[in-house]
Image (tube, rainbow, N blue to C red):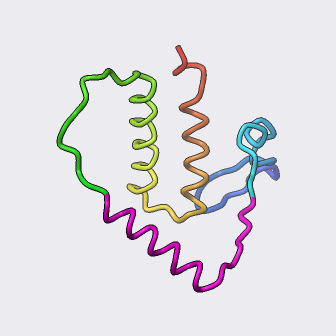
Amino acid sequence: MSDPGQKTEGGALYRHPYPSPDLAARYPFVAHEHQRVDDRTMRDRAESFRASADRRRSVRMFSSDPVPRDLIEAAVVSDMVEGVVAANRLDSRGADTVRAALWVAVDGPALAA
């Protein structure tokens, strides 16, 4: 018999309240507010993006300037988090849940040392 303060969703076990007040305070929910734009604006934005993408090129030259370690670590951790999402083929809801949980784990005091 399960605890009434728990629920199973997509095979994962959550304790109520979820998210915890601490998690909700650190990562507040931001509702997406869709704003429909007219067709002309969408075409202009698409053309602007295509033009920007067409100007991009691979860079074969590298700077000798040092890169701060915290930036390297942030890039590696971000890639690892997205790797977990991709490897598990998570839908957007599952991916958001996993990302939040992984970032909480990564931002923990043990890694700050």
Of 101 and 5, nearer the camera is 101
Left or right: 40 as drawn, with respect to 49: right
What residue is drawn where x is 61% and y is 45%? 100
Q: Quadrant of residue 89?
A: bottom left
The x and y percentages for residue 88 are 43, 57
Give the residue at the far top of this rendering: 113
How many discs appear? 0
Left or right: 67 as drawn, with respect to 47: left
Of 88 and 33, nearer the camera is 33
What residue is drawn where x is 66% and y is 79%? 37
Left or right: 105 as drawn, with respect to 1: left
The x and y percentages for residue 45 are 52, 72
The stretch of residues the image draws in magenta is 31-55
Q: Is residue 27 magenta?
A: no
What residue is drawn where x is 31% and y is 57%? 56
Of 33 and 65, nearer the camera is 65
The x and y percentages for residue 93 are 60, 62
